[in-house]
Image (cartoon, grey):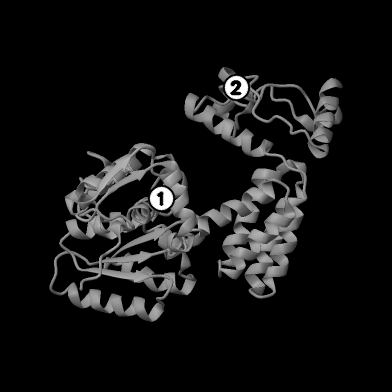
Amino acid sequence: MAILKPLAERLRPQNFDEYVGQEHLVGENAPLRKIIESGKVPSMILWGPPGVGKTTLVNVISKMTDRNFFTLSAINSGVKDVREIIDKARKNNLFSKANPILFIDEIHRFNKSQQDSLLGAVEDGTLVLIGATTENPSFEVISPLLSRTQVYVLKHLEERDLDKLIDRAINEDEELKKLKIIIEERDALYRFSGGDARKLYNLLELVTNSATDGEIIINNKNVVDKLQENIALYDKSGEQHYDVISAFIKSVRGSDADAAVYWLARMLEGGEDIKFIARRLVILSAEDIGLANPNALLFANTCFEAVSKIGMPEARIILSECTIYLATSPKSNSAYMAIDKALAMVRETGNLPVPLHLRNAPTKLMKNLNYGKDYKYAHSFDNNYVEQQYLPDKIDGIVFYEAGKNAKEESIKKYTDYIKSKK
């Protein structure tokens, strides 16, 4: 008796018309789609959260290109496996016009030596590399390899994308078509799947797999009940990983040290990459603690360096210390809010001209054009402060940084208010 494939595998798209989401990349006339359809496949890194279609997109590319296709998983492959594929690629290139494609899933799990082993083959065109990662490639992919690839960012699926996935499953899957499925509510399906197409299909399959010939009513209550009955089955692929890291971050942000240490323990017991955890703490220290305790960033960065040097099991102590320190620190997101507000202004107003008095004047011509004229050197004034315009004319007076309500930033605000009052 043939084993039935999971729903997500049965419905895996074979072409761009069946692919759902990522319109900015593969919609009609979108850049990546045009490149693939032209047959000119560049080396690339596909970066995005889980379940948004990275592997599916690679599958579509493999179907649409007349090339030899090799696949490796960074979890269980090493330098030896890479070299074997490169040798095969070189031999195949003698008989094929198009260079073969090597797809490496979770490429962020490759260490430096493993990534180094790819460099020569990518550089001389022996093969085209496609890597998929959920982590920022700037941190996880070595610079020489990153410079030889194009990074494409995949976004979270929107509700309309999830609607398409559900409708396609019910109307096109040979197994689900046999059932009478009535969808009354979709909120729970979308909430528990978290915008992850694979989780959505797993959950849909979970809700429908106990059906016989009767009606299957899908509403929020039925989804929650079925999920609670089968939580182990639902998480069979380790998808809860992303929920746990979310709970960890939110516990630290919420100043609950006990919860934060618990979620840390869950990750460590599950074999999570300790550098992944430490990196999240560095980000969190700037985003959620920021100027309320500037030492938090130094502490978290030191934690990252120490964890990288020492490894497990001792790294658990360092991670615990940093987690508790950050959780019990005063919180402020003022720096995070300030830069996002400034970026939004830049995108809205474009490249506004720098005021003349702030411009550098290394040449006589620039001086004749009044570059740098009337600039006031702050250190020549009392309290090293002098009032002058620093923003472009169009947005002069705009406030980006607003001090948080905590002792450190109130002290900063008190100081800046003081020196301005003494002008």
Residue identified by numbered label 1: 196
Under circle 2, the secondary element is loop
Residue nearest the viewer, comparing 390 with 348? 348
The percent coordinates of residue 368 (x first, y second) are 57, 23
> Going by the image, does 60 lie left or right of 108?
left
The percent coordinates of residue 330 (x first, y second) are 77, 44
- Vertical placement of 290 versus 395: above or below? below
The percent coordinates of residue 117 (x first, y second) are 40, 74
Please name the amino acid that badge 1 sits on: Asp
| Residue in the picture at 25% in, 66% down | 4
Earlier-in-chain disc, 2 versus 1: 1
Residue nearest the viewer, comparing 107 with 51? 51
> Going by the image, does 298 lie left or right of 273?
right
Is residue 423 in view from this perspective?
Answer: no
| Residue in the picture at 18% in, 54% down | 39
- Mark carried by residue 370: 2
Q: Are marks 2 and 1 in contact (CB under 8 Å)?
A: no
Under circle 1, the secondary element is loop
Pointer 1: residues within 10 angstroms few (<14), some, or many (20+)?
many
The percent coordinates of residue 307 (x first, y second) are 66, 68
| Residue in the picture at 63% in, 48% down | 250
Tell me the quarter of the picture where residue 95 sits.
Answer: bottom left
> Going by the image, does 85 lie left or right of 299?
left
> Going by the image, does 415 lie left or right of 196?
right
Number of labels in the image equals 2
